[in-house]
Amino acid sequence: MNRDQFRQELEKRDIVLNQEQMDRFETYYQVLVDWNERMNLTAITDREGVYLKHFFDSVSAAFHFDFTGVTRVADIGAGAGFPSLPLKICFPHLDITIVDSLNKRITFLNALAEELDLTGVSFFHDRAEQFAKKREHREHYDVVMARAVARLPVLSELCLPLVKEQGTFLAMKGAGGDEELTESEKAFGILGGKLLQADHFKLPEEESERVIIQVKKMKPTPKKYPRKPGTPNRQPLV
């Protein structure tokens, strides 16, 4: 997907980017590739691959969820900033919080935000299990999202404690998303969530399957969750 195709495909979905926003995406690409020579951020480094599999794929969450009506968004395990920073470029009003367990990625994100001249972004070097226990963050966010971090029952325990009541947990999944959904009903119930919808689509060109899962936060998450770091992975709520 070249830059013109990227812009046109977003316009088809009523996301219209101006030249400044397009320039930011190109700067994002250049900074990503430059830093990737020094640290392992992504296996995808060709421009067309990054625009399709990182930028477009990240923004695809907005095809099914209205980001114009929310402000505080947390992204768990964002790595090189996906999906929240492409969404931030498209929707500048968003206040983005990114949590990642590797400090070198936080260093990259700080440098990237400076290059892109982004405001309203915060980066935290922390484990999601510990971050969600902090009073100032717990049940604070309108939307908590994650892309390609962990299986859905695990991801639910990391993300739902951060979602405010009536807020949304957004999980971006590939072809196995439906199978993970069937494993996650127990976790949603325990953590105070309820499945709202699961939207399916295919990435342009390569036709790979994607599922955007929306879980609404119906009631507070019990204080015991998330459990200690590592426990959700070892003993998922299934």
Image (cartoon, rainbow, N blue to C red):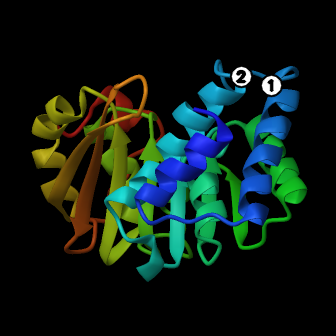
Q: In this orientation, which residue lies closer to the viewer: 152 or 52? A: 52
Where residue 236 sits: x, y (%)? 26, 34
Residue 86: percent from the left, percent from the top?
61, 53
Name the side, left or right, on which 204 lies relative to 136: left
Q: Is residue 109 toward the left or the right of residue 72 in the image?
A: right
Q: Which secondary structure lies at badge 2?
A: loop
Circle 1: residue type: Asn
Q: Is residue 78 visible?
A: no
Residue depicted at x 55% and y 57%: 131
Residue tagged by mark 1?
36
User: What is the secondary structure assignment of the residue under circle 1?
Assistant: helix
Q: Which residue shows up at 53% across the image and 32% down it?
A: 53
* Residue drawn at (25%, 40%) of the image: 153
Decide if residue 123 is on the left or right side of residue 93: right
Of callouts 2 and 1, the N-terminal one = 1
Q: Quadrant of residue 205?
A: top left
Q: For residue 55, what is the image quadrant?
A: top right
Whether residues under marks 2 and 1 lie with C-beta atoms below 8 angstroms apart, the answer is yes
**Image coordinates for residue 65, horizontal then vertical, percent:** 34, 64
Residue type at mark 2 is Thr
Which of the labelled discs sits on residue 45, or is there none?
A: 2
> Residue 63 has which mark?
none
200 over 34 or under it: above or below:
below
* Nearer-the-camera pick, 64 or 96: 64
The picture quadrant where one finds residue 219 is: bottom left
Above or below, 104 relative to 100: above
Measured in 3D between alpha carbons, the distance from the residue under mark 2 to the one under mark 1, in whole angstroms, is 8 Å
Residue at the spot 67% in from the left edge and 41% down from the top edge: 3
Mark 1 crowd level (few <14, some 14–19, many ≥20, 10 Å Cα): some
Residue 174 appears in view: yes
Q: Which of the image's four quarters has the C terminus?
A: top left
Single out the mark in the foreground, 2 or 1.
Answer: 2
